[in-house]
Every structure is written in structure tokens, then in C-alpha cells.
């Protein structure tokens, strides 16, 4: 995960917003929320998932989002973005826009 994103999440998910500020209670305050993680990459998405085990994606899901109570966590991997045609890029953007509108 890029350091800028990690720093952003550390600032946003401070005690009192994502978890209770009292460490004895340790209650997740974002239960009932969902997330979609969109990852674009230069390599084939299947290779990233199969060979590398999608380590960065799983880290974000388990160590941050699931920890603060966000579920379900959906994911969309877009591989080989440099080689996508303009038509294919627009199709991906339209698909992501539709997913955002539906909240899925």
C-alpha cells in the first residue's frame, strides 16, 4: 500500500471514529459499513492474485478494514492497464461507476 494512503488511513481512523477511544472497550464503530477496494496494476490481475497472493490487498482488508468492523469488503482488480485500449478503459470506468451507484 502506498505510504500516502497508509498515512491517510491512520489519520482518518483515529480513536473515537473507527474504534472507541477507551482501549478497555475496544469496540468497532464502523460495523454495518461496506467497502470496495479498486486496484489497478501493470501486471495481469490473475498473476497478482495467484502468484503474489494479493498480499497488499489482503493486508488492507484484514489489518485495517475488517479490524475496524467494515464488512463486506469487495474487491475489483484491473490488470494490464497500460495496454488497455481507450474503449476498454471507458468500459472499466463505466463498470466502476455503476458499482458505485449501486453501492456494491
Image (cartoon, rainbow, N blue to C red):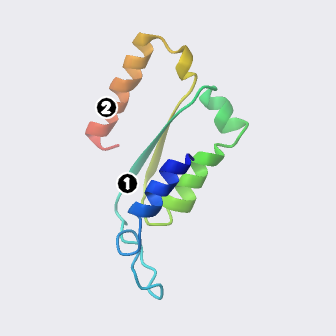
Q: Is residue 24 left or right of residue 31?
A: right
Residue at the (61%, 47%) spot, across then down: 56
Q: Residue furthest right?
A: 51
Query: Where, by quadrant of the figure, is residue 47 drawn?
Result: top right
Q: Quadrant of the C terminus?
A: top left
Q: Is residue 104 left or right of residue 39?
A: left
Instruction: Write down the residue under mark 2.
Output: 97
Q: Position of residue 88 (x, y in %)?
A: 44, 15
Calculate the distance from the C-alpha at mark 1 to the C-alpha at mark 2: 16 Å
Q: Is residue 75 left or right of residue 55?
A: left
Q: Which mark is residue 72?
A: none
Total marks placed: 2
Q: Dot 2, crowdedness within 10 Å: few (<14), some or many (≥20)?
A: few
Residue at the (43%, 58%) spot, across then down: 71
Query: Where, by quadrant of the figure, is residue 99 drawn?
Result: top left
Secondary element at image label 1: loop
Q: Position of residue 36 (x, y in %)?
A: 42, 45
Q: Which mark is residue 34?
A: 1
Residue at the (47%, 11%) spot, across then down: 85
Amino acid at each position: 500500500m502506498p505510504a500516502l494512503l497508509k498515512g491517510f488511513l491512520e489519520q482518518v481512523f483515529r480513536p473515537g471514529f473507527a474504534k472507541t477511544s477507551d482501549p478497555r472497550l475496544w469496540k468497532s464503530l464502523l460495523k454495518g459499513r461496506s467497502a470496495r477496494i479498486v486496484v489497478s496494476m501493470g501486471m495481469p490481475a490473475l498473476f497478482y492474485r495467484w502468484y503474489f497472493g494479493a498480499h497488499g490487498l489482503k493486508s488492507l482488508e484484514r489489518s485495517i478494514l475488517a479490524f475496524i468492523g467494515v464488512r463486506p469488503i469487495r474487491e475489483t482488480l484491473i490488470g494490464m492497464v497500460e495496454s488497455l485500449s481507450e474503449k476498454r478503459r471507458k468500459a472499466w470506468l463505466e463498470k466502476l461507476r455503476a458499482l458505485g451507484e449501486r453501492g456494491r
